[in-house]
Amino acid sequence: MGPEAMASFQTATTAAEARSAELRLVARLREGDEEAMTAIIGRHRRRIIRVAANALRDSHEAEDVAQDAFIKAFREIHRLRDDRAFASYLYKICVRLCMDRLRSRRPEPGIVDGAEPSGGPGVETRVVVERLLEQLTPCLRLTLVLREMEQMSYEEVASAMNVPVGTVRSRLHAARERFRALWVEATKES
Amino acid sequence: MILNDPCHKCRRLRQKRAISSLSAFEEAWLQEHWLACPECAADEAADLQVRAVLRASASNIDASHDFDEKLLRRVRLDRGARTLAYWSPAFVGAALAGIAALALIQVLAFRPDPKPAVLEGREARRVELPVIPDSGFTIHR
Ligand SMILES: [Zn+2]
């Protein structure tokens, strides 16, 4: 076995081990095991907060939503039919909660969150992106965020938003077009 | 004619690519068109640039230091509240049953004697009231 084949074999083995560890944790979670809860929080915490932060563009609100998502997922674990789908079940709950928050928000200029790290594009670009995202409908905004920022596949976005893949593709197309028009307008102004 | 316009075909294929997928032949046609047409190439580049801006603007925050602690506290509270909500109808039912049982015991223990009281040799009598002497006052109504 060559070094590349060895590396890919090791990656596959690690992924398989991680999946079976998650299955064991979910089984214990069903029994109400608090240690399993802590381990599950540790596994998904970062990504759930990031999804919420990208959707809501507010780190405090993102933490609130992430906590609500975990609590709801634990409370309604009996609704999960297949333990292997725990992650997508959790993201679905998180996306639904983000959607509710976005819908309840009054349209206003983007929230500028000073707690964002300053790596990557300049703060000004981030602020512009936030302001433009605020101008998209919650559905278009979440689709764009999950696909472009979270780099989810079409299938993952469809599962998280509980819509068919075709709907994701058409929403994404509309969201990109709208965002691009807004971006062109905003960058022309400056 | 618009149908023969390669730039129109380019836009149509890009739209098709967005909502479904392109064949290898269509992909190759696009690549070739972009080499020959600076306007369409610039349009595609602008699309890619906007997507790159979005990707680069993605938040990368991590949880605050007490996230897990706060969450576990909330999970415990939630479980406690649900346990209480689950058992409270039973508690209320048990309490009501207890009160009803006590009331029944009270009624049975202090029930009046069912035999009627015999008032031997006692009957209502007319009693002569003492006559109060006239005080001299008259009450006018
Ligand atoms: Zn062209």
Image (tube, coloured by chain):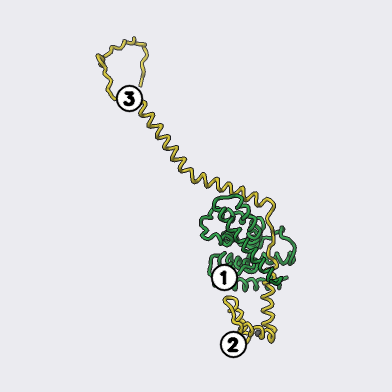
Crowding at dot 3, Cα within 10 Å, few <14 / some 14-19 / many 20+, comes out as few
Question: Which chain is represented by green in the image?
Answer: A
Alpha carbons under labels 2 and 1: distance apart: 30 Å
Cα–Cα gap, marks 2 and 3? 107 Å
The residue where tag 3 is placed is B112
Residue denoted by label 1: A168
Which is nearer the N-term, disc 2 or disc 3? 2
Mark 2 and 3 residues: CB-CB less than 8 Å, in contact? Answer: no
Return the chain for callout 2. B
Q: Residue furthest front?
A: A1
**Residue at (69% x, 53% y) in the render:** B64
Chain where mark 1 sits:
A
Quarter holding residue A48: bottom right
- Horizontal and vertical percent position of residue B81: 54, 46
Chain letter corresponding to the colour yellow: B
Amino acid type, residue under disc 2 in the picture:
Ile
Toward which corner of the image does residue B105 lie, by quadrant? Answer: top left
Front-most of residues A117 and A154: A154
Q: Amino acid at mark 1?
A: Val
Q: Is residue A186 above or below residue B131?
A: below
SS at circle 3 = loop
In the rendered structure, the residue with mark 3 lies on which chain?
B
Q: Which circle, 2 or 3, is nearer the viewer?
A: 3
Position of the C terminus of chain B by quadrant: top left
Q: Nearer the viewer, mark 2 or mark 1?
A: 1
Q: Residue at x 66, y 62 (%)?
A: A110
Which of the two residues, A19 or A115, is positioned nearer the viewer here? A19
